[in-house]
Image (cartoon, helix red, strand yellow):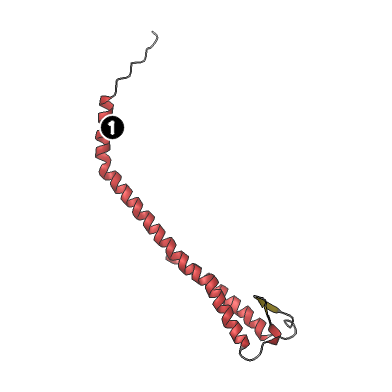
Amino acid sequence: MNRLLKVLAAIVAIGLVLSLAGFAAIVLTAGEPFGRAVLSINDHDIVLSGLSGNLPALVLVGLVMAIVFAVVVPCVVVVPLLAIGTGLALGALAIVAASALLLSPLWLIGWLIWRAARPARPAPVTAG
């Protein structure tokens, strides 16, 4: 399980780095190739070629926060919940198994009483 978490963390980290590198390249080279690129959020348009001063850094920080909230936070919440659910299921299974082991002599006695109390079956007739 620990190895799986390390692999997932590495995948998330690589995705974050690639996203940041791509967006930084877009923001830093917002000249002619990206002069018409527009981000539209809630009817507000941000033209990448029109960004100047600290706005590119602010947009980069906003993208990092969006990626963290969209990818990392759900992973941080879901993985522990899965671990807790698995632990509870295994605990319930252990309780059921221990109860079955403790009650098995009573089931055996009940089965023997039932076998002794039921009427006997007639013997099958064989042709001879």
Q: Which class describes the residues within 10 Å of circle 1: few (<14), some (14-19), or many (20+)?
A: few
User: What x and y, as percent, mark residue 94?
Assistant: 32, 51
Which residue is pictured at 70% across the width and 79% down the height? 38
Q: Quadrant of the C terminus?
A: top left
Which residue is pictured at 64% across the width and 75% down the height? 42
User: What x and y, as percent, mark residue 43?
Assistant: 67, 76
- Residue 4, visible in the rendered structure: no
- Residue 106, visible in the rendered structure: yes
Callout 1: helix, strand or loop? helix
Which residue is pictured at 29% across the width and 48% down the height? 98
Residue lying farthest bottom? 53
Image quadrant where residue 91 sits: bottom left
Left or right: where 10 falls relative to 127? right
Which residue is pictured at 43% across the width and 63% down the height? 81
Q: Is residue 30 above or below residue 66?
A: below
Task: State the count of labels.
Answer: 1
Residue holding disc 1: 111
Q: Is residue 124 above or below residue 22?
A: above
Image quadrant where residue 79 sits: bottom left
Mark 1 residue type: Trp
